[in-house]
């Protein structure tokens, strides 16, 4: 017996007869095939989809669908802004960490042309011409063995915070800070007009670095909170932070060299 193909099975005709329950007389007769059944099912599925879509659109209209879509657009916009802010924060953190390493005296790293090998500043070698030039410059500088960077003694700066200044004798020439005893949450003011170039949190306290004109840099440590951000301008005597505890560490640097703050600030 030959097996029927798929097209033959779909087109085989069947009769659906509906009879009366009382006398079994024929009421209705339907000629159907599997192809017709599949087509009817597809039609009803499509009809159900359009009915559901119409009801959904109607309900969306009644409940303010425009507001929902506007909210979605705002959420997407906020998400994009947050990503941008995260990138900006990462860049600022990298800048602050690099600046912090320079202040701590750590040698910067350089990448060679291939980008595969990190070189320390002390590992770089000089050629004969550079060595001779360096010796010539060192000979000229040796004529000024007692030179120390210091701003003009006529300059007068604002007192950064009210309190009692304690000067500690430290052997390290790179450490000439003044420790000011204050009350908790005492406001800290800017030494002079300038720009905040670095701000980072070390342990539980904030550290702020302000660049002033003529190569002067002031540093403030031991702050509980700060009202300014990096790259913001600040005015002389303008408050920008508050003391964390009972001591605020204050430093002054001139052209890359530490100087004694008590010689230029009246505490």
Image (spheres, rainbow, N blue to C red):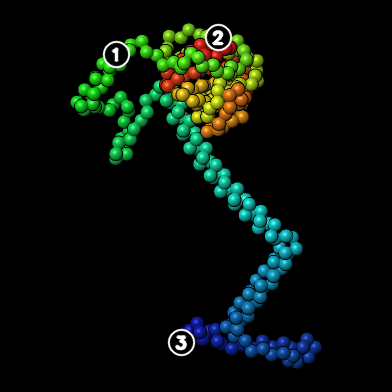
User: Closer to the observer: label 3 or label 1?
Assistant: 1
Say which element carries label 1. loop
User: Closer to the observer: label 2 or label 3?
Assistant: 2
Q: Indicate whether 213 appears above or below 92.
A: above
Percent position (x, y) of residue 225? 61, 26
Give the alpha-carbon distance from disc 2 to disc 3, as whole Å: 110 Å
Circle 3 packing at 10 Å, graded few (<14), some (14-19), many (20+), is: few
Query: Splitting the image into 4 quarters, where does residue 111 fall?
Result: top left
Mark before the other along the chain sequence, 3 or 1: 3
Residue drawn at the location 62% of the way across and 86% of the way down: 32
Give the alpha-carbon distance from disc 1 to disc 2, as whole Å: 35 Å
Q: Indicate whether 111 appears above or below 13.
A: above
Q: Judge from the rendering whether residue 135 lies leftward or rightward of residue 258; answer left or right.
A: left
Say which element carries label 3. loop
Percent position (x, y) of residue 227? 61, 29
Mark before the other along the chain sequence, 2 or 3: 3
Residue drawn at the location 57% of the way across and 29% of the way down: 234
Are the residues at dot 3 and dot 1 in contact (C-beta closer than 8 Å)?
no
Q: Which residue is mark 2?
A: 166
């Amino acid at each position: 017996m030959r097996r029927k193909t798929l097209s033959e099975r779909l087109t085989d005709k069947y009769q659906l007869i509906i009879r009366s329950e009382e006398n079994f007389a024929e009421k209705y007769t339907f000629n159907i095939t599997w192809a017709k059944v599949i087509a009817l099912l597809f039609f009803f599925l499509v009809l159900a989809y359009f009915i559901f879509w119409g009801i959904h659109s109607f309900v969306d209209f009644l409940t303010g669908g425009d507001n929902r879509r506007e909210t979605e657009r705002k959420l997407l916009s906020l998400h994009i802004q947050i990503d941008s802010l995260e990138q900006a924060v990462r860049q600022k953190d990298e800048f602050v960490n690099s600046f912090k390493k320079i202040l701590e005296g750590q040698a910067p790293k350089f990448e060679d042309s291939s980008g595969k090998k990190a070189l320390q500043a002390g590992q770089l070698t000089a050629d004969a011409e550079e060595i001779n030039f360096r010796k010539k410059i060192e000979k000229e500088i040796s004529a000024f063995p007692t030179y120390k960077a210091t701003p003009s003694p006529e300059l007068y700066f604002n007192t950064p915070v009210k309190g009692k200044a304690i000067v500690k004798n430290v052997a390290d020439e790179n450490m000439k800070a003044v420790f000011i005893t204050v009350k908790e949450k005492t406001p800290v003011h800017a030494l002079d007009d300038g720009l905040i170039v670095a701000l980072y949190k070390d342990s539980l306290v904030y550290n702020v670095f302000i660049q002033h004109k003529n190569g002067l840099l002031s540093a403030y440590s031991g702050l509980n909170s700060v009202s300014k951000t990096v790259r913001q301008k600040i005015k002389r005597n303008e408050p920008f932070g508050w003391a964390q505890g009972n001591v605020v560490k204050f430093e002054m640097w001139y052209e890359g060299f530490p100087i004694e703050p008590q010689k230029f600030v009246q505490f």
